Amino acid sequence: MRLNGRCASRLSRRASETAHLGLGSNLGNPARNLREAVGRIEAVPGVRVVKRSPVYRTEPVGGPPQPAYLNAAIEVETSLEPAALLRELREIERAMGRRRGRRNAPRTIDLDILLFGRRVVRSACLAVPHPRMHERRFVLAPLADIAPRALHPGEKKTVAGLLAKLRDAHRVERTRARIGP
């Protein structure tokens, strides 16, 4: 997803809203990268981390041969609009050494907005709910740990319901790694 001048939005809203974010890393020290990313997200004005999932080790999906990923999800309360939150996440990725290039390439950190309340957002720079989240066990498993009843507004099903019906055979296993208290 690219963010450019055409994707302007208000920086904040009056009321706080719940959003769910996906995190992934498979370069450097992935567990440390996930913890650092959560710390940086917590430092963003207008964003408060409410829940953190366990960390999962997952097989890469597509792309060149690469190491396994560590994936997690967090729930945040935010007063930012979706595009403003995306800008903050992209800045965190950049600061942590993420270089955008080939799709499904290895990365130091990947931060995605999975759900933003019950909103559906489609623009040149942002798609919420995340377009493929309902097809990916590495997204749904950690998200189900923290928000099993969250509703996917496009699919009209809960996260737990989507996970139960998923036919994705990619290996996903919970680790002992933590992304916070």
Image: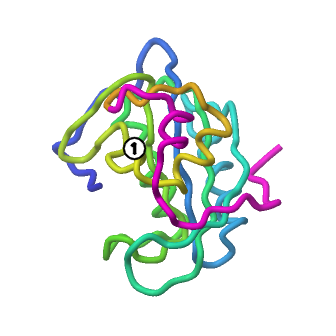
- Quadrant for residue 67, please give it: bottom right
What x and y, as percent, mark residue 177?
Answer: 79, 60
Query: Compared to 160, does 69 lie above or below?
Result: below
Residue under label 1, please give it. 86
Query: Foreground residue, 27 or 5?
Result: 27
Q: Residue 28 occupies which quadrant of the picture? A: bottom right
Please report the residue visible at 59 percent of the width from the left and 41 percent of the height from the top.
143
Percent across and percent down for residue 103 are 32, 71
Q: Residues within 10 Å of mark 1 (few under 14, many from 20)?
A: many
For the residue marked with disc 1, what is the amino acid? Answer: Leu
Quarter of the rendering occupied by the N terminus? bottom left
Between 24 and 40, the one nearer to me in the picture: 24
Q: Is residue 8 above or below residue 17?
A: below
- For the point 62% across and 62% down, the residue is 172
Left or right, 113 with respect to 101, comes to right
Asked whether, in this view, residue 53 is left or right of residue 23, the answer is: right
Q: Is residue 64 above or below residue 143?
A: below
| Image position, residue 43 (x, y; %) | 63, 41
Front-most of residues 166 and 179: 166
The magenta stretch spans residue 173: yes
Residue at 56% in and 61% down: 24
Please provide percent x and percent y for residue 147: 61, 31
Which image quadrant: the C terminus?
top right
- The answer to which image quadrant residue 86 occupies is top left
Q: Is residue 83 left or right of residue 25?
A: left
Give the residues drawn in magenta, as a range: 155-181
- Name the residue: 41% across, 76% down: 105
Q: How many marks?
A: 1
Secondary structure at badge 1 equals helix
Q: Is residue 143 one of those drawn in magenta? A: no
